[in-house]
Each structure stands twice: as C-alpha cells, then as structure tokens.
Image: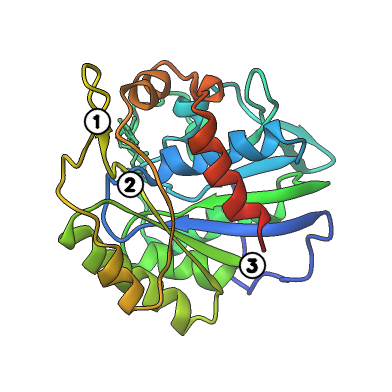
Amino acid sequence: MNEDHDSAPIDKAKKEGVNHVLAIGSGKGGVGKSSVTALLAVALQRQGFKVGILDADITGPSIPKLLGVDGMPKAACSRLIPPVSPNLGIRVMSVNLLLDDPYKPVIWRGPLIANVIKQFWEDVMWDEINFLLVDLPPGTSDAPLTIMQLLPLDGFLAVTSPQSLSAMVVIKAVNMANMLSIPVLGAVENMSYAICPYCHQEWELFGSSHSEELEEHNIPILAKLPIDPSIAKLGDEGKLEAYDNAEVMQSLLAIATSK
Ligand SMILES: Nc1ncnc2c1ncn2[C@@H]1O[C@H](COP(=O)(O)OP(=O)(O)OP(=O)(O)O)[C@@H](O)[C@H]1O
C-alpha cells in the first residue's frame, strides 16, 4: 500500500455504488466481533444482497481466515479488486491479503493505519455493493476512533458477551459512536448461552445476560447468539460460509434489513 497517501478527509459522498456502510465494533477484544461480522455477511449474501467486508482491524485481521479468502487483490485501472469468499463471493479487503506472510505482525502507528483504511475505502472496487461491513478494531483507542471519523458510516452495531466487563466497555464504544453522530443499531450478545448436547437445555456459561445494563444506556440487544462449537470449528477451517443455524442467521439478517 502507498504509505504517502494524503491524510485529507475522505469524500464521504464518493461511494455511490455502496448502499449501506455498517461498522461492527466491540469494546472488549475476543467477544466474537469478527465472527459476527462474517456471519452477518454470510446471512446477507445468502439472501441475495451483495456484501463486502472492509477488515479495519489492521493489527488483528481475522476476516480472510474465517471466510477462507486468500490471494492478493488484483490491480485494475489503479484500483484494487477485492478477493472473494470461495462459495458466496463475499468481497473482502484486509491487510492480511497484502502480506507475503500472514504471521507477520503489522507494527504501524496510528497515522499509517488511518491511511491504509482510507485506501481500503477509496481505492478498492466496492462497486454495486448493498452492504459494506466494516470490522472495527476493539476498544475506543486511536484506531477505531479514526476509522469512525474517516468513513461515512450509516450505522454502528456493537458486539458484546454476557459479562459485566464486556457490557461496560461496549457502552463506552457506543458512547463514542454517539459522540460522533453515528446511528447506533444496538448490540448482538454473542456467547449468550450454550445448548447442552445431552439434555438440550440452554446453559448460561458466562452467567445471565447484561441486557438490562445495556438497555439502561439505550442499547437494545438485537440478537443473542449461542456458544456454538461449530462457529469456532468452521472459523478455524476457513469455512464460516457453511454455518447453517437458521435461527442465528435469521436474527442477524433481521438486524441489517429491518432499518
Ligand atoms: N458464538 C460463538 N461460539 C463459539 N465460538 C465463537 C463464537 N463467537 C466467536 N467464537 C470464537 O471465539 C474466538 C474469537 O472470535 P473473534 O475472532 O470473532 O473475536 P473478536 O472479538 O473479533 O476478536 P478480536 O478482539 O481479536 O478482534 C474465535 O476462535 C471464534 O471462532
């Protein structure tokens, strides 16, 4: 990527071919933000929408791995054609697709990360996309703040887990979105419960939901996803496109399409 890309603000009206730009963020790391982003993309693309994922988690990029996307983006007319997922054709742009070694750490400071995000937005062919999902880095530090300021986001979806610590940090992330006048859709509570394989009862492994705490801050819980070993397994195998829990997929689809 071009490290000298200028740092002028993005022309927010530029992407006429992109209908909705949704950011998926969490306060706390590891709550399943990238998995939820990938599953949301799968749910939408299966429904016939054209979906792209801009992996803005530059130092911890996991979207290509989860969806089995590899190969360098191809250049055409000084723009980049994003590689697509093997079965559904979800377009993905991620820093990991540009590295010759996916295990190489990205040790960049804020301004360089901001420029890369800007290039991912401006220089990648996102033409004719119904939904562009932006997988944000966790937290409320410089990187997510810059991305929220740079990109013309139509909505912010928070991902949390049923732990008070996660709720507290996700409230901070939502407050940041509010301060930047980004419409907050609500939250997905991931890893809400597990289903016992023997008695098929729901089991709240992390304790009960913190939906009340979130709702006190005007953050509705829009979906509760189970801890499902097949999400972890398919993600590890790069086959999250094959996830087939209809209830989960329907609940995610409803979030993006009910606006
Ligand atoms: N509902 C779930 N059931 C089972 N495993 C899950 C679920 N959600 C996520 N995981 C697993 O938890 C791990 C972390 O998920 P993921 O990478 O999506 O989190 P993240 O919040 O994006 O992390 P980071 O903070 O590093 O960006 C992965 O191994 C993923 O497969």
Callout in the foreground (2, 3): 3
> Can the viewer see residue 167?
yes
Quadrant in which residue 229 is drawn: top left
Q: Nearer the viewer, mark 2 or mark 1?
A: 1
Q: Is residue 28 above or below residue 171?
A: above
Which x, y percent locates residue 40? Answer: 55, 42
Comes first in the chain, label 1 or label 3: 3
Q: CA distance from mark 2 to mark 3?
A: 30 Å
Whole-angstrom CA distance, mark 1 to mark 3, is 38 Å
Secondary structure of the residue carrying tag 1 is: loop
In x, y percent, where is residue 174?
Answer: 39, 71
| Label 2: how many Cα within 10 Å (few below 14, some 14–19, many 20+) | few
In this orientation, which residue lies closer to the viewer: 45 or 191?
Answer: 191
How busy is the neighbourhood of tag 3: few (under 14 within 10 Å), some, or many (20 plus)? some
Alpha carbon distance from label 2 to label 1:
45 Å
Q: Residue at x 50, y 24 (%)?
A: 243
